[in-house]
Amino acid sequence: MTHPHLLTDAAAAREFMFGGKARFTLVSKETGKRFTFRVAKPKPDGPFFASVLTGPDNGTDYQYIGYSDGGGFASGKNASPFHPAFKALAWTEANLRAKGVMPDSLEFWHEGRCAKCARPLTDPVSIQLGLGPECAKKDR
């Protein structure tokens, strides 16, 4: 049995990533390296902004690394496309989109909050999906 915060389905992981207020951690099974990201869409008609956790406060210690229109990530102004966290995020999204399967070398963990509204998830089905019941009904 897998952990309820571990997303193993590529489509579910990608949908979570672009939920609008997603926080998740990518772990390399090969190296053990991990990065925690926040991908948010502040305006309904705007891009998604990606940030990586850089300090001990997982609520505020994020650094901007890039943006997306929902189809791939680009490094942002004053952000390096060579940053290891940016490369991990861009590689993950590209693999989820192009191949449609979770790479064997990757673990995708969500923190137990809804990807769309960021409320804590309590229902076991919602925890496995990474979306609350009301948000799961809504379109992105």
Image (tube, rainbow, N blue to C red):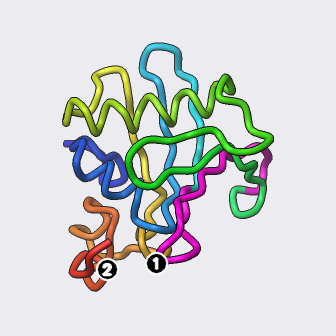
Compared with 98, 125 (above or below) is below
Q: Position of residue 26 (x, y in %)?
A: 48, 37
- At mark 2, the secondary structure is helix
Quadrant, the C terminus = bottom left
Q: What residue is pinned by disc 2? A: 135
Residue kind at label 2, given as amino acid type? Cys
Residue 81: quarter of image: top right
Q: Is residue 109 magenta?
A: no
Quadrant, the N terminus = top left
Q: Nearer the viewer, residue 44 or 128?
A: 44
Left or right of 4 on screen, residue 28: right
Residue 115: quarter of image: bottom left
Could you give the CA–CA distance between mark 2 and mark 1, rounded to whole angstroms?
7 Å
Q: Position of residue 93 (x, y in %)?
A: 39, 38
Left or right of 114 on screen, residue 1: left
Q: Earlier in the sequence, mark 2 or mark 1?
A: 1
Count of marks, rendered view: 2
Q: What residue is pinned by disc 1? A: 117
Q: Nearer the viewer, residue 36 or 127?
A: 36
| Residue at screen point 39% across, 41% down | 108
Q: Residues within 10 Å of mark 1 (few under 14, many from 20)?
A: some
Task: For the residues labelled 2 and 1, say whether their Cβ atoms are less than 8 Å apart.
Answer: yes
Magenta residues (range):
39-57
Q: Residues within 10 Å of mark 2 (few under 14, many from 20)?
A: some
- At mark 1, the secondary structure is loop
Q: Position of residue 111 (x, y in %)?
A: 48, 57
| Residue at screen point 51% across, 36% down | 89
Residue kind at label 1, given as amino acid type? Cys
Compared with 86, 116 (above or below) is below
